[in-house]
Image (cartoon, rainbow, N blue to C red):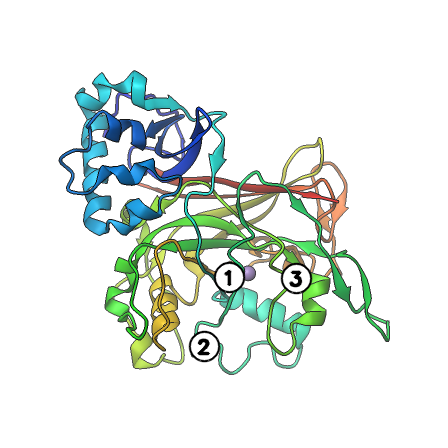
Amino acid sequence: MNTWIDVPTNSDFSIYNLPYGVFLRDDKLTPGVAIGDSIIDLNACAKVGLFADLGFETSVFESDVLNDFIACGKSAWSALRAYLTAQLTVVGTLYEFREKVIVNRLGAKMCMPVKVGDYTDFYSSIEHATNVGKMFRPDNPLLPNWKHIPVGYHGRASSIVVSGTPITRPSGQMMPPDATAPIFGKSKRMDLELEMAFIIGKPNALGEPVDIDNAEDHIFGKVVFNDWSARDIQKWEYVPLGPFLGKNFGSSISPWIVTMEALEPFRCESVKQDPEVLPYLQYSGNKNFDINLEVGLTPEGDEETTIAESNFKYMYWNMAQQLTHHTVNGCNLNVGDMMASGTISGKEKGSFGSMLELSWGGKETIELNNGKTRTFIDDGDTITIRAWCEKDGKRVGFGECSGKILP
Ligand code: MN
């Protein structure tokens, strides 16, 4: 497909993508769609009547988040996507209004795309669970439940921030290796977690589980997710109820939500689950997605080093299984809720999605391009995660999820 908007070669935001975000225009939070280095201002389009025939109330774009639009349902998402695809590939009404409704994306300030009511983090990469298990419990890395339930915990929604927001190194209580009593101080083991998250697009009522065959209908789209983690705080606090203050001081997301429709061409074979899972978690078809992932570490004022390369297709538990399991007890999910994958690690060392694994619990050093080394994240370091799909000359990317650690 050719579009009249200039799209640089290798842009994450090709005509096949059309992701949704919220940006600042004239000091107002405004929903938009990215293409190339441009943003289509959805509220401005609605104001001049461009979306009048799409079958949903276009005042949803007056909102400063996308929740109202997402709540309009799948038919609205598809209608808008089809309209924009058509209008970007012919010289029509969108072209006619281009000076009013299209703005430069480069330098635009991006904001949280949705109001996140609830956030859940899973633990669905078998390589990650096994690696961490080996460090914390050498004799017993993968706990007996792991291959039967997509393990997860309820996280904190209030501290999810958009890419570019700095994260302050947290203080907390920890038990140093040879100590007999805990101490209080700044975390010395600041880490990242390479994850992706999906956003709920269709709610389910309390008491009404979502069947696995319908689960993907409840997903609007995906973002890159960095679940910042303070390993020393986490290690001391996690028994017996799981992650708490070692996690909830900040999580970063990429600003553009890539829709399930845009990801459709990038489905790939699912990971074989052995032993067979219980019937409510069994599914047909391909439910994994081939999404390249990359983590960069940039010391203050220095060049970036790629410290990990992974892929979303390695996930043992897929999104449909996570969502179905989450609702199987009748738990209700709402539009805007966010479900993160858990750290995505591959089999090889260079594909591990956390510094805990890359440095094997701090025992090995990670070499940087500038000759320095790391075991965990230093103050002033910026972590940037990128994600993209590529097939048959089509590229659908997520842009960046980055954050700098402040003292
Ligand atoms: Mn996590």
Comparing marks 2 and 3, which lies closer to the viewer?
3
Badge 1 marks a residue whose secondary structure is loop
**Mark 1 residue CB less than 8 A from any atom of ligand 1:** yes
Q: Position of residue 10 (x, y in %)?
A: 40, 31
Q: Quadrant of ligand 1?
A: bottom right
- Which amino acid type is marked by label 1? Gly
**Mark 3 residue CB less than 8 A from any atom of ligand 1:** no
207 in relation to 233, above or below: below
Q: Residue 338 occupies which quadrant of the picture?
A: bottom left
Q: Position of residue 54 (x, y in %)?
A: 16, 38
> Badge 2 is on which residue?
147
Quarter of the image where the C terminus is located = top right
- Which amino acid type is marked by label 2? Lys
Residue 272 can be seen in this image: no
Q: Position of residue 331 (x, y in %)?
A: 37, 72
Depth check: give the residue in front, 331 or 198. 331
Badge 2 marks a residue whose secondary structure is loop
